[in-house]
Amino acid sequence: MSDAPLIEVKDLGVRLNTSRGPAQAVRGVNFALRRGETLGLVGESGCGKSVTALALMGLLPESAVISGSIRLDGAELIGLPDAAYCKLRGNRISMIFQEPMTALNPMHTIGHQVAEPLRRHTGVSAAEAQLEAIALLDRVGLPDAAKRVDAYPHQFSGGQRQRITVAMALACQPDVLIADEPTTALDVTIQGQILDLIAGLVEERGMSMILISHDLGVIAENVDRMMVMYGGTVVESGATDAVFARMGHPYTQGLFRARPRLGARKGTRLKTIAGTVPELADLPAGCTFADRCAIVEARCRAALPAVVDVGAAHGVRCIRTDVSMGAGGSSA
Ligand SMILES: Nc1ncnc2c1ncn2[C@@H]1O[C@H](COP(=O)(O)OP(=O)(O)OP(=O)(O)O)[C@@H](O)[C@H]1O
Ligand SMILES: [Mg+2]
Protein backbone atom coordinates (compact mmCIF):
# COMPACT_ATOMS: atom_id res chain seq x y z
CA MET A 1 0.00 0.00 0.00
CA SER A 2 1.28 3.44 -0.88
CA ASP A 3 2.29 5.85 1.80
CA ALA A 4 0.85 8.83 -0.09
CA PRO A 5 -1.58 10.85 1.99
CA LEU A 6 -5.28 10.21 1.54
CA ILE A 7 -6.04 13.83 2.36
CA GLU A 8 -3.55 16.63 1.95
CA VAL A 9 -4.48 20.16 2.97
CA LYS A 10 -2.13 22.99 2.08
CA ASP A 11 -2.41 26.60 3.21
CA LEU A 12 -6.19 26.38 3.55
CA GLY A 13 -7.91 29.72 3.99
CA VAL A 14 -11.61 30.50 4.34
CA ARG A 15 -13.05 33.99 4.18
CA LEU A 16 -16.65 34.37 5.35
CA ASN A 17 -19.18 37.15 5.27
CA THR A 18 -19.98 38.01 8.87
CA SER A 19 -22.42 40.56 10.23
CA ARG A 20 -19.42 42.91 10.40
CA GLY A 21 -18.19 42.33 6.88
CA PRO A 22 -15.86 39.74 5.35
CA ALA A 23 -13.42 38.11 7.77
CA GLN A 24 -10.82 35.37 7.65
CA ALA A 25 -12.30 32.40 9.57
CA VAL A 26 -9.47 29.98 8.73
CA ARG A 27 -5.93 30.63 7.51
CA GLY A 28 -2.71 28.78 6.87
CA VAL A 29 -4.05 25.35 7.81
CA ASN A 30 -1.76 22.51 6.66
CA PHE A 31 -2.05 18.81 7.35
CA ALA A 32 -1.92 15.40 5.74
CA LEU A 33 -3.84 12.34 6.73
CA ARG A 34 -2.87 8.83 5.68
CA ARG A 35 -5.25 5.90 5.33
CA GLY A 36 -6.15 4.51 8.73
CA GLU A 37 -4.80 7.52 10.60
CA THR A 38 -6.82 9.51 13.13
CA LEU A 39 -6.44 13.25 13.65
CA GLY A 40 -8.02 15.41 16.34
CA LEU A 41 -8.99 19.06 16.04
CA VAL A 42 -9.35 20.82 19.38
CA GLY A 43 -10.01 24.39 20.47
CA GLU A 44 -12.57 26.68 22.03
CA SER A 45 -15.88 27.59 20.46
CA GLY A 46 -15.50 29.79 17.38
CA CYS A 47 -11.88 28.92 16.56
CA GLY A 48 -12.65 27.51 13.10
CA LYS A 49 -12.96 23.75 13.64
CA SER A 50 -16.32 23.33 11.90
CA VAL A 51 -15.43 25.77 9.12
CA THR A 52 -12.35 23.63 8.39
CA ALA A 53 -14.51 20.48 8.35
CA LEU A 54 -17.14 22.06 6.11
CA ALA A 55 -14.40 23.19 3.70
CA LEU A 56 -13.29 19.55 3.37
CA MET A 57 -16.90 18.48 2.78
CA GLY A 58 -17.50 21.23 0.20
CA LEU A 59 -20.36 22.51 2.36
CA LEU A 60 -19.34 26.12 3.01
CA PRO A 61 -21.86 28.86 2.27
CA GLU A 62 -21.78 30.00 -1.35
CA SER A 63 -20.42 33.41 -0.38
CA ALA A 64 -17.32 31.86 1.28
CA VAL A 65 -13.97 32.45 -0.41
CA ILE A 66 -11.73 29.43 -0.08
CA SER A 67 -8.01 29.41 -0.88
CA GLY A 68 -5.18 26.89 -0.78
CA SER A 69 -5.50 23.24 -1.67
CA ILE A 70 -7.44 20.19 -0.45
CA ARG A 71 -6.46 16.96 -2.17
CA LEU A 72 -8.20 13.61 -1.80
CA ASP A 73 -6.00 10.81 -3.17
CA GLY A 74 -4.11 13.46 -5.10
CA ALA A 75 -7.18 15.04 -6.75
CA GLU A 76 -7.91 18.69 -6.00
CA LEU A 77 -11.28 19.30 -4.33
CA ILE A 78 -11.27 23.08 -4.24
CA GLY A 79 -13.26 24.39 -7.14
CA LEU A 80 -14.80 20.99 -7.85
CA PRO A 81 -18.28 21.38 -9.38
CA ASP A 82 -21.08 20.52 -6.96
CA ALA A 83 -22.21 17.49 -8.98
CA ALA A 84 -18.73 15.98 -8.62
CA TYR A 85 -18.62 16.81 -4.89
CA CYS A 86 -21.99 15.07 -4.43
CA LYS A 87 -20.39 11.86 -5.69
CA LEU A 88 -17.72 12.06 -2.97
CA ARG A 89 -19.85 13.23 -0.08
CA GLY A 90 -21.27 10.34 1.95
CA ASN A 91 -19.34 8.00 -0.32
CA ARG A 92 -15.62 8.69 0.07
CA ILE A 93 -15.80 11.38 2.73
CA SER A 94 -18.54 11.50 5.34
CA MET A 95 -19.41 13.64 8.31
CA ILE A 96 -21.19 13.11 11.61
CA PHE A 97 -22.68 16.36 12.87
CA GLN A 98 -22.80 17.66 16.42
CA GLU A 99 -26.57 17.75 16.64
CA PRO A 100 -28.18 14.56 15.29
CA MET A 101 -31.46 16.26 14.41
CA THR A 102 -29.69 18.51 11.90
CA ALA A 103 -28.53 15.41 10.03
CA LEU A 104 -31.79 13.46 10.26
CA ASN A 105 -34.88 14.37 8.29
CA PRO A 106 -37.94 14.19 10.59
CA MET A 107 -40.18 13.33 7.62
CA HIS A 108 -38.45 10.08 6.62
CA THR A 109 -38.07 6.75 8.39
CA ILE A 110 -34.61 6.00 9.72
CA GLY A 111 -34.36 2.98 7.42
CA HIS A 112 -34.97 5.18 4.42
CA GLN A 113 -32.31 7.64 5.56
CA VAL A 114 -29.61 5.05 6.22
CA ALA A 115 -30.39 3.28 2.94
CA GLU A 116 -30.44 6.49 0.90
CA PRO A 117 -26.67 6.97 0.46
CA LEU A 118 -26.37 3.28 -0.47
CA ARG A 119 -28.99 3.60 -3.17
CA ARG A 120 -27.48 6.84 -4.43
CA HIS A 121 -23.84 5.81 -4.52
CA THR A 122 -23.73 2.05 -4.94
CA GLY A 123 -26.68 1.32 -7.21
CA VAL A 124 -28.01 -1.56 -5.10
CA SER A 125 -31.75 -2.27 -5.22
CA ALA A 126 -34.12 -0.71 -2.68
CA ALA A 127 -34.63 -4.09 -1.01
CA GLU A 128 -30.89 -4.75 -0.73
CA ALA A 129 -30.30 -1.25 0.62
CA GLN A 130 -32.99 -1.80 3.25
CA LEU A 131 -31.38 -5.06 4.38
CA GLU A 132 -27.97 -3.41 4.54
CA ALA A 133 -29.51 -0.51 6.54
CA ILE A 134 -30.88 -2.96 9.09
CA ALA A 135 -27.48 -4.66 9.38
CA LEU A 136 -25.81 -1.27 9.90
CA LEU A 137 -28.36 -0.13 12.49
CA ASP A 138 -27.80 -3.39 14.28
CA ARG A 139 -24.02 -2.88 14.11
CA VAL A 140 -24.27 0.59 15.69
CA GLY A 141 -26.19 -0.92 18.59
CA LEU A 142 -29.73 0.20 17.84
CA PRO A 143 -31.96 -2.24 19.73
CA ASP A 144 -34.49 -4.17 17.61
CA ALA A 145 -33.14 -2.67 14.39
CA ALA A 146 -35.22 -4.90 12.12
CA LYS A 147 -38.45 -3.92 13.88
CA ARG A 148 -37.70 -0.23 14.23
CA VAL A 149 -36.33 0.47 10.77
CA ASP A 150 -39.66 2.04 9.75
CA ALA A 151 -39.83 4.39 12.74
CA TYR A 152 -39.18 8.15 12.52
CA PRO A 153 -36.31 10.05 14.18
CA HIS A 154 -38.48 11.60 16.92
CA GLN A 155 -39.29 8.11 18.18
CA PHE A 156 -35.70 7.63 19.35
CA SER A 157 -33.62 8.99 22.23
CA GLY A 158 -30.76 11.42 21.61
CA GLY A 159 -28.16 8.66 21.97
CA GLN A 160 -30.06 6.38 19.60
CA ARG A 161 -30.39 9.19 17.05
CA GLN A 162 -26.65 9.72 17.14
CA ARG A 163 -26.16 5.97 16.55
CA ILE A 164 -28.44 6.31 13.51
CA THR A 165 -26.36 9.21 12.11
CA VAL A 166 -23.21 7.11 12.61
CA ALA A 167 -24.86 4.36 10.55
CA MET A 168 -25.78 6.91 7.86
CA ALA A 169 -22.26 8.33 7.70
CA LEU A 170 -20.71 4.87 7.43
CA ALA A 171 -23.24 3.32 5.02
CA CYS A 172 -21.00 3.58 1.96
CA GLN A 173 -17.76 2.68 3.76
CA PRO A 174 -16.13 6.09 3.26
CA ASP A 175 -12.35 6.47 3.29
CA VAL A 176 -12.54 9.45 5.61
CA LEU A 177 -14.94 10.13 8.45
CA ILE A 178 -15.20 13.62 9.92
CA ALA A 179 -16.86 13.55 13.35
CA ASP A 180 -17.67 17.13 14.42
CA GLU A 181 -18.35 17.13 18.18
CA PRO A 182 -20.33 13.92 17.73
CA THR A 183 -21.25 13.58 21.39
CA THR A 184 -21.68 17.11 22.70
CA ALA A 185 -25.47 16.87 22.78
CA LEU A 186 -25.38 13.64 24.80
CA ASP A 187 -24.95 12.87 28.47
CA VAL A 188 -21.58 11.68 29.70
CA THR A 189 -22.16 7.92 29.87
CA ILE A 190 -23.67 7.86 26.37
CA GLN A 191 -20.80 10.05 25.09
CA GLY A 192 -18.29 7.36 25.98
CA GLN A 193 -20.35 4.64 24.29
CA ILE A 194 -20.73 6.60 21.05
CA LEU A 195 -17.02 7.50 20.92
CA ASP A 196 -16.10 3.86 21.50
CA LEU A 197 -18.53 2.83 18.77
CA ILE A 198 -17.04 5.31 16.28
CA ALA A 199 -13.45 4.38 17.19
CA GLY A 200 -14.27 0.68 16.85
CA LEU A 201 -15.88 1.10 13.42
CA VAL A 202 -13.07 3.34 12.16
CA GLU A 203 -10.50 0.72 13.13
CA GLU A 204 -12.54 -2.23 11.88
CA ARG A 205 -12.94 -0.65 8.45
CA GLY A 206 -9.48 0.90 8.20
CA MET A 207 -10.91 4.39 7.73
CA SER A 208 -9.19 7.68 8.45
CA MET A 209 -10.90 9.95 10.93
CA ILE A 210 -10.86 13.62 11.78
CA LEU A 211 -12.38 14.00 15.24
CA ILE A 212 -13.39 17.48 16.34
CA SER A 213 -13.86 18.27 20.01
CA HIS A 214 -13.40 21.09 22.46
CA ASP A 215 -12.51 18.45 25.04
CA LEU A 216 -8.80 17.60 25.42
CA GLY A 217 -9.69 14.36 27.23
CA VAL A 218 -11.69 13.12 24.23
CA ILE A 219 -8.77 13.98 21.93
CA ALA A 220 -6.20 12.30 24.21
CA GLU A 221 -8.14 9.04 24.16
CA ASN A 222 -9.19 8.82 20.54
CA VAL A 223 -6.62 10.09 18.03
CA ASP A 224 -3.02 9.46 16.92
CA ARG A 225 -2.28 13.06 16.03
CA MET A 226 -3.83 16.37 17.03
CA MET A 227 -4.05 19.99 15.96
CA VAL A 228 -4.91 22.78 18.38
CA MET A 229 -6.79 25.64 16.70
CA TYR A 230 -7.18 29.20 17.82
CA GLY A 231 -8.57 32.15 15.90
CA GLY A 232 -8.68 30.18 12.65
CA THR A 233 -5.03 29.07 12.77
CA VAL A 234 -3.40 25.86 13.96
CA VAL A 235 -1.27 26.96 16.92
CA GLU A 236 0.14 23.52 17.77
CA SER A 237 0.20 20.13 16.09
CA GLY A 238 1.88 16.80 16.57
CA ALA A 239 1.49 13.23 17.73
CA THR A 240 -1.04 13.25 20.57
CA ASP A 241 1.45 11.70 23.02
CA ALA A 242 4.16 14.21 22.09
CA VAL A 243 1.86 17.22 22.47
CA PHE A 244 0.56 16.05 25.85
CA ALA A 245 4.09 15.28 27.03
CA ARG A 246 5.42 18.74 26.09
CA MET A 247 2.82 21.38 25.31
CA GLY A 248 4.48 24.25 23.53
CA HIS A 249 1.85 26.89 22.86
CA PRO A 250 0.59 29.05 25.73
CA TYR A 251 -2.94 28.43 24.40
CA THR A 252 -2.57 24.62 24.55
CA GLN A 253 -1.18 24.97 28.06
CA GLY A 254 -4.14 27.15 29.03
CA LEU A 255 -6.66 24.67 27.60
CA PHE A 256 -4.96 21.90 29.58
CA ARG A 257 -5.08 23.83 32.86
CA ALA A 258 -8.73 24.70 32.25
CA ARG A 259 -9.91 21.11 31.83
CA PRO A 260 -12.30 19.86 34.50
CA ARG A 261 -10.77 17.13 36.64
CA LEU A 262 -12.37 14.28 38.52
CA GLY A 263 -11.43 14.16 42.17
CA ALA A 264 -10.43 17.82 42.36
CA ARG A 265 -10.90 19.15 45.88
CA LYS A 266 -14.33 20.61 46.55
CA GLY A 267 -14.39 24.31 45.89
CA THR A 268 -11.31 24.16 43.61
CA ARG A 269 -11.81 26.73 40.90
CA LEU A 270 -11.01 25.90 37.30
CA LYS A 271 -8.17 27.99 35.94
CA THR A 272 -9.81 29.62 32.95
CA ILE A 273 -7.94 31.36 30.16
CA ALA A 274 -8.37 35.10 30.67
CA GLY A 275 -10.45 36.85 28.00
CA THR A 276 -12.59 35.32 25.27
CA VAL A 277 -12.10 34.19 21.67
CA PRO A 278 -12.11 37.40 19.63
CA GLU A 279 -14.77 38.10 17.01
CA LEU A 280 -13.46 37.18 13.59
CA ALA A 281 -13.52 40.79 12.49
CA ASP A 282 -11.40 41.76 15.54
CA LEU A 283 -8.64 39.16 15.21
CA PRO A 284 -5.28 40.75 16.03
CA ALA A 285 -2.80 41.18 13.18
CA GLY A 286 0.01 38.95 14.48
CA CYS A 287 -0.48 35.94 16.73
CA THR A 288 -4.23 35.41 17.10
CA PHE A 289 -3.75 34.53 20.80
CA ALA A 290 -1.72 37.68 21.61
CA ASP A 291 -4.49 39.47 23.49
CA ARG A 292 -4.93 36.58 25.95
CA CYS A 293 -1.34 35.43 26.30
CA ALA A 294 0.55 35.84 29.58
CA ILE A 295 3.96 35.99 27.85
CA VAL A 296 3.07 38.22 24.90
CA GLU A 297 5.61 40.79 23.74
CA ALA A 298 5.57 43.45 21.05
CA ARG A 299 6.95 41.29 18.22
CA CYS A 300 4.13 38.74 18.70
CA ARG A 301 1.77 41.34 17.28
CA ALA A 302 3.91 42.16 14.24
CA ALA A 303 3.11 39.14 12.08
CA LEU A 304 1.53 35.70 12.30
CA PRO A 305 4.31 33.63 13.91
CA ALA A 306 5.87 30.88 11.81
CA VAL A 307 5.65 27.28 12.96
CA VAL A 308 8.62 26.29 15.14
CA ASP A 309 9.61 22.62 15.23
CA VAL A 310 9.94 21.59 18.87
CA GLY A 311 10.21 17.86 18.25
CA ALA A 312 9.75 15.26 15.54
CA ALA A 313 6.68 16.43 13.58
CA HIS A 314 5.65 18.56 16.57
CA GLY A 315 5.12 22.19 15.56
CA VAL A 316 4.20 25.25 17.58
CA ARG A 317 3.15 28.58 16.07
CA CYS A 318 4.82 30.74 18.72
CA ILE A 319 7.98 32.83 18.83
CA ARG A 320 8.26 32.48 22.59
CA THR A 321 8.71 28.72 22.96
CA ASP A 322 12.01 29.45 24.73
CA VAL A 323 9.89 30.80 27.57
CA SER A 324 6.71 28.71 27.22
CA MET A 325 8.71 25.47 27.04
CA GLY A 326 11.85 26.57 28.84
CA ALA A 327 13.10 24.91 32.00
CA GLY A 328 10.59 25.84 34.68
CA GLY A 329 8.61 27.57 31.89
CA SER A 330 6.59 30.18 33.74
CA SER A 331 3.56 29.56 31.60
CA ALA A 332 3.27 25.79 32.09
N1 LIG B 1 -21.81 30.68 7.76
C1 LIG B 1 -21.09 31.54 8.48
N2 LIG B 1 -21.15 32.88 8.22
C2 LIG B 1 -20.42 33.77 8.91
N3 LIG B 1 -19.58 33.43 9.91
C3 LIG B 1 -19.48 32.14 10.23
C4 LIG B 1 -20.23 31.11 9.54
N4 LIG B 1 -19.92 29.91 10.07
C5 LIG B 1 -19.02 30.15 11.06
N5 LIG B 1 -18.75 31.49 11.15
C6 LIG B 1 -17.80 32.11 12.07
O1 LIG B 1 -16.53 31.49 11.86
C7 LIG B 1 -15.84 31.33 13.08
C8 LIG B 1 -15.45 29.89 13.26
O2 LIG B 1 -16.63 29.13 13.42
P1 LIG B 1 -16.66 27.56 13.59
O3 LIG B 1 -18.09 27.14 13.46
O4 LIG B 1 -15.67 26.92 12.70
O5 LIG B 1 -16.19 27.39 15.10
P2 LIG B 1 -15.95 26.04 15.91
O6 LIG B 1 -14.49 26.00 16.24
O7 LIG B 1 -16.51 24.90 15.17
O8 LIG B 1 -16.75 26.32 17.25
P3 LIG B 1 -17.74 25.37 18.13
O9 LIG B 1 -16.83 24.65 19.10
O10 LIG B 1 -18.64 26.32 18.82
O11 LIG B 1 -18.46 24.45 17.21
C9 LIG B 1 -16.77 31.87 14.17
O12 LIG B 1 -16.38 33.18 14.46
C10 LIG B 1 -18.12 31.85 13.52
O13 LIG B 1 -18.95 32.86 14.04
MG1 LIG C 1 -18.14 23.68 15.48
Image: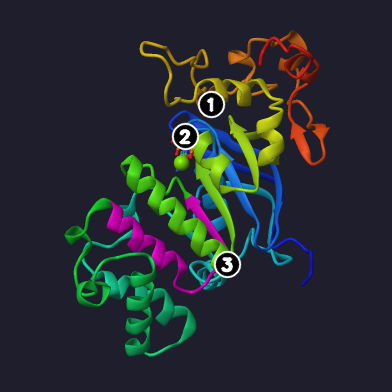
Q: Residue at x 73, y 29 (%)?
A: 317
Give the residue type that dot 2 points to: Thr
From the viewer's perspective, tell me whether residue 270 is left or right of residue 209. left
Q: Which amino acid lies under the numbered mark 3 shown in the image of this protein?
A: Pro
Pinpoint residue 118: horizontal percent, then vertical percent.
43, 78
Q: Is residue 186 magenta?
A: no
The one of 72 and 4 positioned closer to us in this rendering: 4
Find residue 215 and report its horizontal and vertical position in percent. Answer: 49, 35
Tell me the SS state at disc 3: loop
Q: CA distance from mark 3 to mark 1?
A: 30 Å
Q: Earlier in the sequence, mark 1 or mark 2?
A: 2
Q: Residues within 10 Å of mark 1 (few under 14, many from 20)?
A: some
Circles 1 and 2: CB atoms closer than 8 Å: yes
Dot 2 falls on a residue whose secondary structure is strand
Q: Which mark is residue 18?
A: 2
Q: Residues within 10 Å of mark 2 (few under 14, many from 20)?
A: few
For mark 3, does the 10 Å Cα neighbourhood hold few (<14), some (14 to 19), or many (20 or more) residues?
few
